[in-house]
Each structure stands twice: as C-alpha cells, then as structure tokens.
Image: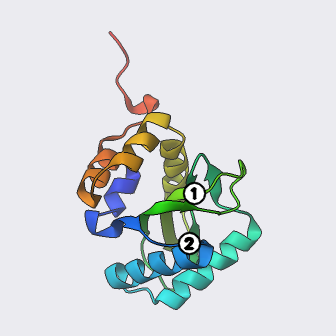
C-alpha cells in the first residue's frame, strides 16, 4: 500500500471533471475537500494559490501536484481530480494537465508529509501508472491503481 492510498479514499477522487484553468480546477478540488474533510473551500483555494505563486506544481506529462499547508489542520488529506479535457497549468513541458493529485498537510508539516509528496511525484513519473490512471473508468478503479502501486525499492529482490 502506498502512503498516498493511506490518506486517499475513493470518495476523494473525481473523474471526468469539467474545469478549464487553474481557478476552476482549484475550486473543484476545494469543494471536494470541504465536503470530505471540512476545510473551508475558500481556505483551500487561497492556500493552493499561495503555493502556486512560488512555482508551478505542474510536473509535465499532463500531471500536477498542487499542495499546501493548512493552519489548524491536524492530518494530511489528499484528493485526485482527472479532467475530461486537459487544461493549461504552466507545466515545465508546456503541456496541458489532466490529472491533479492534491495534497494538504498541517501548517507544521513533518518529514512524513514530505515523504507523501515525494511518493506522489515518483508515482506520477511512472509512465505505465500515468496511463492507467488516465484510463481508469471510475474513482474506485483509480484508487485501486494507486493502492497497488509500489516503488522498485519496495519490491522484493530477485532470488
């Protein structure tokens, strides 16, 4: 099981979202996070915008990891949005983004939170996993794909 799947439930995933542009994507994610985790949507959007001003969280290859620290929040939360049509997101390769993995952590983030962020980046750099996540027909299938993913370091050594 991945660190991400430990904090991500199928209810935290939405596929075929109709959103164009960063503001619409952040708004859709914020409403989901508010519904699922009780963080006010306005707080989520403001926090994501502030982080995005530092540098783009777009990784390239159609994926992004918007993330931020939330004052008063006690534990990490995640959400995944897959857009029906990719949108511009200032990714380093200039390509539009269709798959967003959001990570929200307490203001006093710990090394464990950085580990989750690093794992998400590693997951999304896996070409086969990216293709699978883009093809999953529903949130349950997407969650299963994330939960079953493992790094090469976690796989047992050949005998």
Q: Is residue 94 visible?
A: yes
Report x, y in % for residue 89: 65, 63
Vertical order, 62 against 50 (above or below): above
Of tags 2 and 1, the one toward the viewer is 2
Q: Can residue 100 be seen in this view?
A: no
Looking at the image, residue 99 sits to the left or right of residue 37; the answer is right
Asked if the residue under mark 1 is in contact with the one under mark 2, i.e. CB atoms within 8 Å, the reply is no
Report x, y in % for residue 53: 74, 73
In 3D space, how far apart are the residues under numbered discs 2 and 1 (Cα atoms)?
A: 10 Å
Q: Mark 2 points at which residue?
A: 20
Q: Dot 1: what SS? A: strand
Q: Residue 19 carries which label?
A: none
Vertical order, 136 against 82 (above or below): above
Q: Mark 1 points at which residue?
A: 97
Vertical order, 2 against 10 (above or below): above
Image quarter (top left, top right, bottom left or bottom right) of the C terminus: top left
């Amino acid at each position: 099981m991945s660190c991400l799947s430990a904090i991500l439930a199928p209810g935290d995933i939405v596929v075929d979202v109709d959103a164009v542009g960063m503001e619409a994507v952040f708004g859709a994610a914020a409403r989901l996070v508010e519904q699922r985790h009780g963080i006010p949507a306005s707080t989520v959007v403001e926090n994501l915008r502030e982080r995005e001003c530092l540098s783009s969280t777009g990784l390239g290859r159609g994926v992004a990891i918007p993330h931020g620290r939330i004052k008063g929040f006690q534990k990490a939360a995640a959400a995944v949005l897959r857009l029906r049509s990719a949108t511009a997101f200032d990714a380093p390769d200039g390509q539009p983004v269709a798959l967003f993995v959001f990570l929200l952590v307490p203001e006093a983030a710990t090394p464990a939170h950085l580990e989750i962020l690093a794992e998400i980046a590693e997951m999304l750099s896996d070409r086969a996993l990216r293709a699978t996540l883009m093809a999953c027909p529903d949130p349950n299938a997407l969650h299963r794909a994330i939960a079953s993913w493992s790094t090469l370091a976690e796989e047992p050594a050949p005998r």
